[in-house]
Amino acid sequence: MKKKLNLLLLSVFWSLVLALIMTSIGFLHQETIDLTDGAGGGVVWSRVLYLFVGWFGFSMVVMLVGALLYVGSTRLRGRGKH
């Protein structure tokens, strides 16, 4: 159980890191309508939050699938040794 918990915590951590990196990359190459207000030029934080949550969700799904594959393959290898 401890291995599963550690994998979940690692998945959440790396998903947060990847979401922060990808959201910050979103500020580098943007049109005037992407993350800023076209008229005022200020940052629209609801769009930034939407982008962050999207990247977090995507990376979390990828990390959890990888963690489940790892746990499954470890269990299958453990059964073959008995």
Image: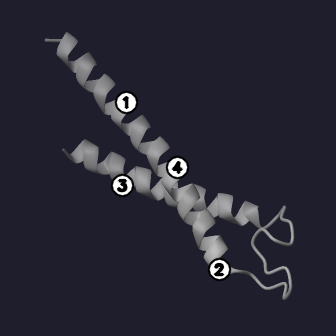
Question: In 3D space, how far apart are the residues under numbered discs 3 and 2 (Cα atoms)?
Answer: 27 Å
Please name the amino acid that badge 2 sits on.
Answer: Trp
Question: In 3D space, how far apart are the residues under numbered discs 1 and 3 (Cα atoms)?
Answer: 16 Å
Q: Which residue is mark 2?
A: 45
Question: In 3D space, how far apart are the residues under numbered discs 4 and 3 (Cα atoms)?
Answer: 13 Å
Numbered circle sitting on residue 69: 1
Q: Which residue is mark 4?
A: 59
The C terminus: image quadrant: top left
At 74% across and 81% down in the image, what residue appears?
Answer: 43
Residue 16 at x, y percent in the picture: 51, 61
Query: Earlier along the polypeptide chain: callout 3 or callout 2?
Result: 3
Say if mark 1 contacts mark 3, CB within 8 Å: no
Question: In 3D space, how far apart are the residues under numbered discs 4 and 2 (Cα atoms)?
Answer: 21 Å
Q: Is residue 79 above or below residue 44?
A: above
At 41% across and 37% down in the image, what residue appears?
Answer: 65
Numbered circle sitting on residue 47: none
